[in-house]
Image (tube, helix red, strand yellow):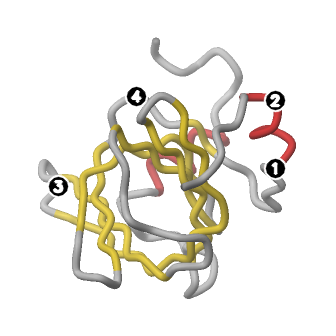
Amino acid sequence: MLPEFTGNEERRKDRRSSLRQILPSGVPASIHLSSGHSGYVTLGDISRAGACIVRRGLLEVDLNDQVFLSISDYGLFQNVYLSACVKWMTILNQKIRMGLAFTEGPLLPGTILDQYFDRALLAPGSLEA
């Protein structure tokens, strides 16, 4: 079982080299483990090199495990299926947060995720609340 971390310890451990985009709450995704198990998760943030996912309840996953992250936009009839490696995990109050690094390199433009990366190009304060 993993130890529980406070927010300060979590921030110190977060050393991403890519600009992350905080996502609107509730962007759904699913994670598929090498054991064949899967579960629904929420994207906390994303970069071209990785993502942070959040799940209420636990998953049987360890550091450095290979997983697949599936993100769908049913309105656009598109999905993205990404291979990733688990880089860090925290568990607090039956909620797990996981840092994933994409294993096939950084995401290139041309996916449904561009809508989140394009937010960085907007002027401050221009995002709708």
Viewer-side label of 1, 3: 1
Rendering quarter of residue 38: bottom left
Q: Secondary structure at mark 4?
A: loop
Q: CA distance from mark 3 to mark 4?
A: 19 Å
From the image, tell me which residue sits under label 3.
76
Q: Is residue 10 above or below residue 8?
A: below
Residue 109 is situated, as x and y percent measured from the top left of the image, at 52, 70
Residue 10 is situated, as x and y percent measured from the top left of the image, at 75, 40
Please tell me which of labels 2 and 4 falls first in the chain.
2
At x 28% / y 59%, what residue is drawn? 30
Residue 124 is situated, as x and y percent measured from the top left of the image, at 70, 21
At x 37% / y 50%, what residue is drawn? 58
Seen from the viewer's position, the closer of residues 58 and 55 is 58
Residue 99 is situated, as x and y percent measured from the top left of the image, at 60, 57
Please tell me which of labels 2 and 3 falls first in the chain.
2
From the image, tell me which residue sits under label 1.
13
From the image, tell me which residue sits under label 2.
8
In the rendered structure, the answer to whether residue 66 lies left or right of residue 72 reads right
Rendering quarter of residue 12: top right
- In which quadrant will I find the N terminus? bottom right
From the image, tell me which residue sits under label 4.
25
Viewer-side label of 2, 3: 2
Please tell me which of labels 4 and 1 falls first in the chain.
1
Q: Residues within 10 Å of mark 3 (few under 14, many from 20)?
A: few
- Asked whether the residues under the numbered discs 3 and 4 touch, taking CB atoms below 8 Å apart as contact, a structural biologist would say no
Q: Residues within 10 Å of mark 2 (few under 14, many from 20)?
A: few
